[in-house]
Amino acid sequence: MRNQPIRVSTLDCTICMETLPGVERFPVAGCAHAFCAGCVRQYIAARVEDNLLSMGCPDPGCKDGVLHPEECRDIVPPQLFQRWGAALCELALGDHKFYCPFKDCSALLIDDDPGPGDGGAAALTNVECPHCNRMFCVQCKVPWHEGVDCAEFQRLGKDERGREDLLLRKVAQKRKWQRCPRCKMYVERVAGYQHMRCR
């Protein structure tokens, strides 16, 4: 009896079709399936890359098994685990998420402002990004448009929303310049008729 070999359990992974030592076995919660840790790692990486965040059992016929992030933490690289966690957070936030409008920041932010009509409180507009510390309009989701209310800003064309354009509008209002209805150029009336004619 003393000379009998010790049996080492093995795993036949149905994904890579390899026979591996039992220590490589990774069981799936909620079902009887188990796969090698390497295949589960690759499965999770592919799903996260494709933005498919619900992690069911890798066996296509199984509807009960689930891969939970905390159970997979030890077999998934830290960067992948963080991407998976961040994607799950974004998914959970649903319509309450948006990104900082500054392209060099683009931090994920939560829109917890009730907005007009959701409680009687005045809606926030001018907000500072907690990551880049720059001001932006939370209603329009753009860099802060000082001196122009949100309704007026929304009526502006996409090519009229830049910082310089907004400063020009401010000067035009102060000096009572008018815009040509045809070409949209600013015109200052010095004398003569009240009618404008575009050339």
Image (cartoon, rainbow, N blue to C red):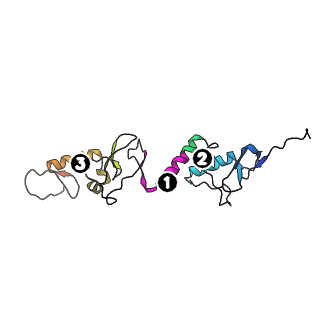
Residue 108 forms part of the magenta stretch: yes
Please identify the residue farthest to the top as the structure is shown. 3
Across and down, in percent, residue 134 comes to 34, 41
Quarter of the rendering occupied by the C terminus = bottom left
Q: Is residue 130 left or right of residue 68?
A: left
Across and down, in percent, residue 110 comes to 41, 50
Between the C-alphas of marks 3 and 1, the distance is: 36 Å
Residue at which label 2 appears:
70
Amino acid type shown at disc 3:
Gly
Q: Is residue 1 left or right of residue 28?
A: right
The residue segment tinted magenta is 83-110
Image quadrant assignment for residue 31 = bottom right
Residue 124 forms part of the magenta stretch: no
Depth check, front residue: 7 or 91: 7
Marks 3 and 1, the one that precedes in the sequence: 1
Between the C-alphas of marks 1 and 2, the distance is: 17 Å
The crowding category of the residue bearing disc 2, from other C-alpha atoms within 10 Å (few below 14, some 14 to 19, many at least 20), is few
Depth check, front residue: 61 or 64: 64
The kind of secondary structure element at disc 1 is helix
The kind of secondary structure element at disc 2 is helix
- Observer-side mark, 3 or 1, equals 1
Residue at which label 3 appears:
147
The crowding category of the residue bearing disc 1, from other C-alpha atoms within 10 Å (few below 14, some 14 to 19, many at least 20), is few
Amino acid type shown at disc 1:
Ala
